[in-house]
Image (tube, rainbow, N blue to C red):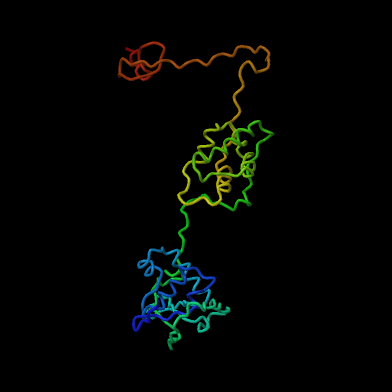
Amino acid sequence: MAARHPEQFTVVGNHLAQHPEMSLTAIGLATHIQSLPEGTPVGIKALAAKFPEGETRIAAALRELETYGYLARTRERMPSGQIVTRTISYNQPRLNPAFTGTPVPAAPRSETAPEPEEPEPAAPTHSVTPTATTPTATPTAETPTPSAPDRTERTTPTGHLPLLPAPAADSFHHSAAIALLARLRLDDPRLLLSERDIHRLAPAVNAWLERGVDSADVRRTLSASLPVEPLRHPTAFLAHRLTALLPPPLPAAAPRSSDLPNLPNLPDLPRPSRPAPFQTCDGRERAFRSTEPGHCRDCAPRFAAA
């Protein structure tokens, strides 16, 4: 049973309340905005402070309302130099000059539940207070800018992997490489790989094992210090690490004496003589080199003459 509201009510058309393509969040947000008095802030942060939906859902709902002609947002520069966003709400998409689409007709009203008709308000538009933003060309608070991850490792779509390292020959580590990649999901569930991706990455793991890296060290390198944000393309992420962190080959070992060829007998070369030890001069308490104790070269002539 419906009761007529003599005051404090808002007239909402069925073309909005029964819109077949917009989400319930967008329909409810449009109804709320149309019920507000003129000059009320309707920025993303102001709406997120009122409702449990976060800024991301509210921003997506506002974009829906713009798409279907129920909202228009323009940027204006104030005399102070600030750039503000002016939001105008329309209760009819055909009244929005920026809307070029075709308004979606409302669903037919059920004849079994007639509703009292309310008169349409005369005012065609509903404006709200501009939302101030910074005096730069960056997106305003109306459109949240996702923060870029502060990491040097970049991932690419799974279908466009970087040029992966390959083993020098058909390595016998192929089964070990496949087992290593399959067990990465035990370290982190985000590293769950398909069988196709495991076979694409296995040659690069073979190249690591071929260079003398232990399988436990390869697994630790691939799964350690993972980013906090979700891994949308774990295959590309692992391909980047296998390529960028590839260690150099081990240097060749020095040949053993038993591996050297038989060389002809060479004559014994004289060993270099060791320098004479230090002695203390009896005349000046001065150190000098000599095989026998005595005097240094400065004191020797004087004592010899005496």
Residue 145, compared with residue 81, is above or below; it is above
- Quarter of the image where one finds residue 99: bottom right
Q: Position of residue 233 (x, y in %)?
A: 56, 50
Residue 94, compared with residue 165, is above or below; it is below
Q: Position of residue 100 (x, y in %)?
A: 57, 80
- Nearest the eye: 17 or 154: 17
Is residue 56 in view from this perspective?
yes
Q: Is residue 134 left or right of residue 241?
A: left
Residue at image location 56% in from the left, 13% down from the top: 270
- Nearest the eye: 51 or 290: 51
- Quarter of the image where one finds residue 303: top left
Residue at image location 51% in from the left, 46% down from the top: 190
Q: Considering the image in quadrants, where does the C terminus appear?
A: top left
Residue at image location 51% in from the left, 39% down from the top: 186
Q: Position of residue 38 (x, y in %)?
A: 37, 81
Residue 258, compared with residue 126, is above or below; it is above
Q: Considering the image in quadrants, where does the N terminus appear?
A: bottom left
Q: As drawn, which residue projects farthest toward the front?
A: 112
Q: Is residue 53 left or right of residue 236?
A: left
- Nearest the eye: 110 or 173: 110
Q: Is residue 201 left or right of residue 216?
A: right
